[in-house]
Image (cartoon, grey):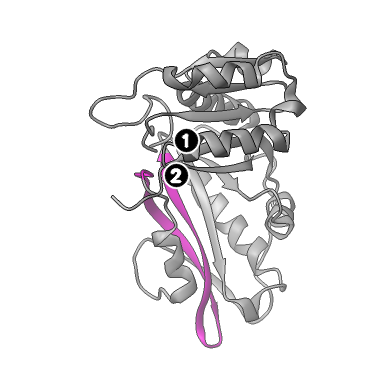
Amino acid sequence: MTPSPINRARVQSVILDVLTAEQFCDRDQLLDGQVHVVEAGSSDSETKWAPGGRWFDIPQPYFSLVSMGVGGVVTASPELMSWVRPLYEGVNRDEMMEPVRIAEVSNRMEEHGQKTFGPFPRWVCAEEDLREHTPPAGYKIELRDDEHDRHTVMAQQAVSRRPGERTTHQFRVVAIGSDGPIGSAGVTADGDGLYQIHIAITEEHRGRGLGRAITYAITRATFDHGAVPYYGTTSVNTWSMRTAIACGFYPSWVHLFSRDVRPV
């Protein structure tokens, strides 16, 4: 049976399902242009994550801020509301991410042993937007579902998960040069039908178009598995953003969140 195409409408629907679960909100609250402050509900007692969201543990207490470009949703545990509501109620989309507010969140959450991450842009791709890139001369790309040929850089993908991220690596593409494997792109299953792309290339082989070639290959493989691919960057990693854009990815949402990163 041929899987249905991963078009823009399906991508949008999958992302909205995930974000409404993680933000404990309605779709309208993500799309109506207003900034909403929402109280977090409880996670699934067995899985520890929000049902329908990505497979990341819900920290206690919980703070998460999301914008899809038209307003946004600030979600926090009940015990945080005494300072979250005054900080965010009545602000607009751009004011959500002002440094003074991010600093306040960071200081408050540090009191709970949590580190604040972001704001991180998240990029998605639909099949009709994917742009093909072939490997440069002297390289080839292979699809793998094993653990062979992992060098130091590629092995970083296997340990890149933050505490509480219960995602699993699915498959990868490997870039091979004259001296063997020199880079790869892998995907983690971050939720039902949602795969995140991770890229690693040795420094001496960068700047030759390999990033685009392996991003295209892993994105194509993700579509073939019937999943929606997404790509995360930091707000300053313009090189990674250029790679995403060149392959047809477009910005979908921006995320700011806090998480306990202390050793268990």
- Image-based side of 166 in relation to 62, left or right: left
- By secondary structure, the bulk of the magenta-drawn segment is best described as strand
Number of marks in the rendered image = 2
Which structural element holds mark 1? Answer: loop
- Image-based side of 27 in relation to 264, left or right: right
Q: Which residues are magenta?
A: 164-190
Residues tagged 1 and 2 counted as in contact (Cβ below 8 A): yes
Which structural element holds mark 2? Answer: loop
Along the viewing direction, whichever of 53 and 90 lies nearer the viewer:
90
Residue 185 shows in this picture:
yes
Q: Position of residue 160 (x, y in %)?
A: 44, 57
Q: Position of residue 171 (x, y in %)?
A: 41, 56
Residues at marks 1 and 2, CA–CA distance in whole angstroms: 8 Å
Q: Amino acid at mark 1?
A: Pro
Residue at x 45%, y 61% (from the top left corner): 157
Q: Residue furthest left?
A: 46
The circle on residue 3 is: 1
Q: Position of residue 247 (x, y in %)?
A: 69, 52
Residue at x 70%, y 14% (from the top left corner): 34
The circle on residue 83 is: none
The circle on residue 225 is: 2
Q: Amino acid at mark 2?
A: His
The picture quadrant where one finds residue 5 is top right
